[in-house]
Image: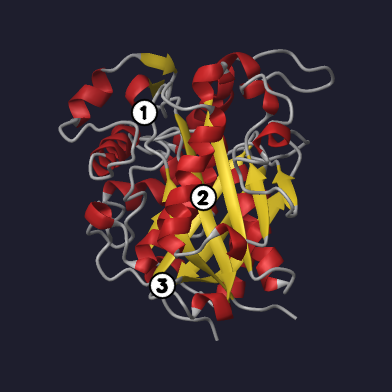
Amino acid sequence: MRYRAAVLGTGQTHHRAKRQDVSMAGLCREAIDRAMLDAKVGWDEIDAVVIGKAPDLFEGVMMPELFLADALGAVGKPLLRVHTAGSVGGATAIVASGLVQAGVHERVLAVAWEKQSESNAMWALSIPVPFTMPVGAGAGGYFAPHVRSYIRRSGAPEHVGSMVAVKDRRNGARNPYAHLHQPDITLEQVQASQMLWDPIRYDETCPSSDGAAAIVIGSERAAAAVERPAWIHATAMRSEPTTFAGRDQVNPQAGRDAAAALWRQAGITDPLAQVDAAEIYVPFSWFEPMWLENLGFAAEGEGWRLTESGATELGGTLPVNASGGVLSSNPIGASGMLRFLEAARQVMGRADDHQVEGARTALGHAYGGGSQFFSMWVVGSERPG
């Protein structure tokens, strides 16, 4: 039997290039304290803790959950760690919600973080791993050929990627927690920025951030004490190998399968018409039109037209990344949870200056590895039937 579950409260840190004012434990606790305050719960009411972060090599700390247990409030409680590369924040929230939906726990705290300043993710992603295809020069070096392939296949004009960067950075300026605040950024500035991995320019690339996110997820009974919870209508995860013969790197099958399962579970037949806001994992600007197609918001080869039309702007048909998204804040291990968290804030009506007016149904989306792990959820202001 599957029980109803809802987001009771959310919390996040201020994301910066270097959070030297706090330790890793302090960073997590900052997000946790805000989530518990938002949910109006104390430690005695948390039954279990689920944590997620990117690979240990990113920070050079093996199994940080060992020394973080006290700061996470997990002493004497079940503690579970999740790892699915960059999608881990989303996967962590889904595992936590599953524990509630299965009737195992009443309230579960989900936490994700990354302190990139204490290591070098670029280096961690560039070392040769035996029997594995090399990534090349970090994530950008890996994904740039996929972007070039998308542009060739779809015929998208060059300015579309820059449009996404301008939109997300301006949105990020509305979010006090965002790492980058660029309210006056222009298309011309983005197009004049340095080319890093052709065709990806500097301003079309996510920053490296320190930050954490936390979500308190509870049962239907726990949600009754919250004024406006975000009900979890559907969740989905899928994965596939990084490489195999015939793999479509531009439009991965795992992402399409996850989206189809998500919409089916949520009872959504026309995502573009029925979803009010979307937080989509876009670390490089061209991934907005690519994922719009992969998620079924647009037909294959047509995602860039949706972006170019202004539909993904705040006030558009489908506002995408009203929070500023990954292009404005990227603590990798937490970036997926931030997408889920921001989707919840939209339907809870707590997104402040980047609130999408009238948002009742929202998507949270994350992907990781070589576009091989996908996690996503649909949350709504109404209790699911």
Number of labelled discs?
A: 3
Q: Where is residue 302 in the image (x, y as percent from the top left)?
A: 42, 51
Q: In this view, does 83 lie above or below 49?
A: above
Can you say which quadrant of the picture contains the C terminus?
Answer: bottom right
Q: Position of residue 180 (x, y in %)?
A: 30, 31
Q: Is residue 363 above or below residue 28?
A: below
Q: Which residue is drawn at 41% across and 54% down?
A: 342
Disc 2 is placed on an element classified as: strand
The residue carrying mark 3 is 274
The residue carrying mark 1 is 204
Residue 251 visible here: no
Q: Where is residue 189 in the image (x, y as percent from the top left)?
A: 21, 23
Q: Which residue is drawn at 61% across and 78% down?
A: 4
Residue 213 visible here: yes
* Residue kind at label 1, given as amino acid type: Glu
Q: Which residue is drawn at 66% across and 79% down?
A: 3
Sequence-first tag of 2 and 3:
2
Asked whether the residues under the numbered discs 2 and 3 touch, taking CB atoms below 8 Å apart as contact, a structural biologist would say no
* Residue kind at label 2, given as amino acid type: Ala
Q: Residues under labels 1 and 2: Cα distance?
A: 27 Å
- Label 2 Cα crowd, 10 Å radius (few <14 / some 14-19 / many 20+): many
Q: Residues under labels 2 and 3: Cα distance?
A: 27 Å
The residue carrying mark 2 is 214
The quarter of the displayed image where residue 349 is located = bottom left
* Residue kind at label 3, given as amino acid type: Gln
- Label 3 Cα crowd, 10 Å radius (few <14 / some 14-19 / many 20+): some
Which marked residue is nearer to the observer: mark 2 or mark 3?
2
Asked whether the residues under the numbered discs 1 and 2 touch, taking CB atoms below 8 Å apart as contact, a structural biologist would say no
Q: Residues under labels 3 and 1: Cα distance?
A: 29 Å
